[in-house]
Image (cartoon, rainbow, N blue to C red):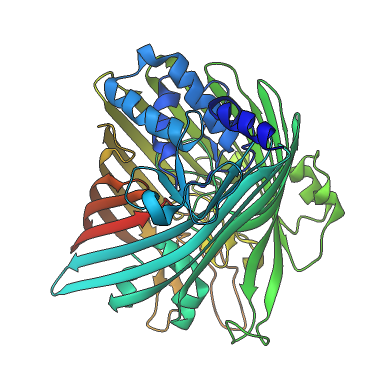
Amino acid sequence: MRFSILIIYLLFPIINIWAQIEDVPISNSVYDFLLRLETKGLTGTTPLTHIPLQKQEIVSILRSARDNQTKLTHSDIDLLQKYEKEFGITKAEYSVIFPSLTHTKNIFWSGFFDHTEKVFYKYDDFVNSVDIRPLGSIDFVYNKVDSSRYVTIGTLGLRLNGTIDNKLGFYLQATNGRKIAGDKQLAFYNPEYSKSFKFAKLDSDIDLTQSHITFQSGWFQAKIGRMEEKMGAGLFQSTYISTTSPPIDAITLSAKFSNFKYTYYFGSLIGLIESKEQSGINTKISSKFINQHRFSVRPSWGEIAFWESVIYSDRGLDIAYLNPLSFLKSLEHQLHDRDNSIMGMDFTIRPFSNFTIKSTFLLDDIIFEKIGTGYWSNKTAFNIATIYSSDYNIDFGMEYARVEPYTFSHFSPKNNYTNDNQQIGSELQPNSEQYGMLVNYWWGQRFPIKFSIKYIRHGANQYNSDGNLIRNVGGDARYTRRDPNPSTGFAGDPYEVTFLDGILEKTLSINFSFGYELINNLYLVSSYQFLKTNEQIDNYIRLLIILNEF
């Protein structure tokens, strides 16, 4: 037995890449590097339209990059070596607290100050792998307005991930954080903290978790779990699913072949709260579900995909929607047109090396004879982006995005495109447009030096001092057009809308950031943001120390 383990250990650089079925969370900096590799045409038939990716998919991309290293710069190759080590393509040494048959070096003796990877526990062989490591961060945000404000947040956690029998992948990440000092409201500068209900609503700790279990056999994959996802082709925008809402608990079934992938997605959402209580046993929340299908064709030059989704509420599992191979729009009509159906198309095209075009078009609802009339129910969203990766370690990206009024809303507020009252798709609110530019400079570190400019125009609804809606221009996914109410004398919202009508909010955001690996798995990330909304000017400085990326 020990001889077999020894043989496995000696072959580690070759075999460890086999047992990697679990997903890699989208917080990992490898995705920035993968976008550069995709633009260079080195990701094969694995686009970045729907992330997270599995470890084995990322390994395949990194191996392809190594095979085509003549297309990479010296800085690219330096960074590639770091990720080859992280994902097990090349041998890495580990120091552990709890030894295993494949990793025995104790962190408390010689391993604490050396350059080994430091984890709680590590095991890997032909078909099995387990990795348990600590997570931690100190997050400091400083805001200079009329007077100085700051906040410091501390977070600790644990990550467990691995693969069993090369067929079952697992991932569990749990973190808990607290405000150490400063202004709590400034903590929401990091939108992740707003996804913790205990912190945002109950003034308690920052309690967050993500997890999944994946079964894979050949072309078939089944997954259940809660993971942050992005879906939709773009640069800044993920029009179908973004990280603006809390992670969705979902079951996913996929069929993947060399140039084609089909995904069925069934998720449970946090619906409309129908009680005064926001939490506890007396809280009443309507049931709410989301179904999605996505068909994608993946030639060597990119990807073309069709996507559809439906949201329904206040009833149990609808068998019609459980069928993984169906046309959701027609089903929704057959089920008496009660639900919120959306569809879209996206594409990623590389017309030549080092240049990519990405675009997504989402159709929420449309009446063809009303096109061009400003009719409120013609609800669409789209974005188009171009990305160029130069041979001088610099990437350039530009994007335009637009979301028409009332998009993502529904005549039943229980069926709008939200999860826990936060928009699921697109980083832009309805009745908005965005112009964006991104420059990345790659200098051999995991975190490129980033410079971005975004200019956003949003036509906002008007509310009174009590938060009640008094003028609706389609600027919020939670509110659709309202019909007249003779009993109250309310005349109803207009049938025709004007793009950017309402309270016009103009936002200019200029961002600069970079990061540096202090020692193995310990990173310092620094950023500065100049933010101007109409006449209000803010300056934000953020310092983030991270132990293992999460």
* Viewer-side residue, 500 vs 256: 256
**56 left or right, relative to 221:** left
Which residue corresponds to the image point at 35% horizontal and 75% vertical from the top-left? 179
**50 left or right, relative to 475:** right
Is residue 429 placed above or below 217 in the rendered structure?
below
**Place of residue 73 in the rendered image (x, y in percent of width and height, measured from the top left):** 30, 20
**385 left or right, relative to 168:** left
**Place of residue 161 in the rendered image (x, y in percent of width and height, measured from the top left):** 59, 49
In the picture as drawn, the residue positioned furthest to the right comes out as 319
Which residue corresponds to the image point at 51% horizontal and 33% vertical from the top-left? 88
Is residue 294 placed above or below 432 in the rendered structure?
above
How many labels were placed on the picture? 0
Is residue 414 placed above or below 96 in the rendered structure?
below
**212 left or right, relative to 531:** right
Which residue corresponds to the image point at 63% horizontal and 72% vertical from the top-left? 272
**Place of residue 243 in the rendered image (x, y in percent of width and height, measured from the top left):** 49, 53
* Viewer-side residue, 518 vs 287: 518
**Place of residue 66 in the rendered image (x, y in percent of width and height, measured from the top left):** 44, 19
In the picture as drawn, the residue positioned furthest to the left comes out as 146
Which residue corresponds to the image point at 41% horizontal and 51% vertical from the top-left? 548
- Displayed quadrant of residue 290: bottom right
Judge whether residue 77 can be spotted in this image.
yes
